[in-house]
Amino acid sequence: MAGKRTSSRPHGGEANRTPEAEAVREYLLANPSFLTDNPDLLPLLRPEAQHSGENVLDMGQIVTRRLGDEVARLKAEHEELLANGRANQTAQKQIHAAALAMLEARNFEHLIHVVTRDLAEIFAIDTVTLCVETADDGPTQAPTGGVYVLPAGQVDRLLGPGAGSRLEGVRCGDRAIFGPAAELVRSQALVRLSPSPGSPPGLLALGSRDGDKFHPGQGTELLQFLSRLMERLFRAWLDLSN
């Protein structure tokens, strides 16, 4: 059996390119992202170190190092995506559990208890409260625990006029919102509640001692869904107009 022919010419030289090698080279030149899209091939690259003089870096080593850095970057991005996916899945499960708990409330007082007591455990945070603005001649103290009365216009001052929510880290929570638990709060999520056109606006307030639990730029779709459900339940139990 005839053995595989090898060339005696220097490895890597222009004259050493076979038609197959030239085709691969042309393909890679035409598709520069191929190796990036197939990082599993990068470890196969083992360019020989060739130095033309003292303290001169071989280009093959430089390319290999850069490709290795790119693989590490892509791996880190992949792991971050997986972590975000797991966090989103956990958040969805929590919102589903919270929604079911609220729907199972036997009356309005029980609903308030679920929101201000049970949701903190479901979300694994330190406190959840409800706040409502007072009318000009309305009460200044809420009749039940976990609910706080805010001055008229305070919701817009906290969130911004017409804004739906505000998530941020804080040095300490506001006692007007979180009551005695305010000293624990290092991050908070404030979500507007508008049960009906004729009722004053309110807040669903979530506070955590974890300063990274809530932060600007975090998605609020799930919290907005929970707030809209809460508004509908308030309207049903209090017989409010839509």
Image: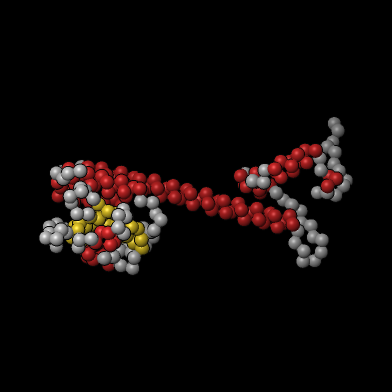
Q: Quadrant of the C terminus?
A: top left
Give the residue at x 64% y 54%.
68
Q: Residue furthest right?
A: 8
Res. 151 image quadrant: bottom left
Q: Is residue 139 left or right of residue 89?
A: left
Q: Is residue 156 left or right of residue 219?
A: left
The answer to whether residue 86 is above or below residue 171 is above
Picture coordinates of residue 34 (x, y %)? Answer: 65, 44
Q: Quadrant of the N terminus?
A: top right
Q: Nearer the viewer, residue 28 or 154?
A: 154
Indicate the colouring scheme.
Answer: secondary structure
Picture coordinates of residue 153 (x, y %)? Answer: 23, 60
Q: Is residue 186 left or right of residue 197?
A: right
Q: Is residue 194 left or right of residue 188?
A: left
Give the residue at x 32% y 50%.
223
Picture coordinates of residue 114 (x, y %)? Answer: 21, 50
Asked if residue 126 can be seen in this view, the reply is no
The answer to whether residue 146 is above or below residue 93 is below
Q: Residue furthest top?
A: 1
Q: Nearer the viewer, residue 163 or 60?
A: 163
Give the residue at x 81% y 64%.
53
Asked if residue 147 can be seen in this view, the reply is yes
Give the residue at x 19% y 54%.
200
Q: Nearer the viewer, residue 240 or 27?
A: 240
> So how many labels did they put on this image?
0
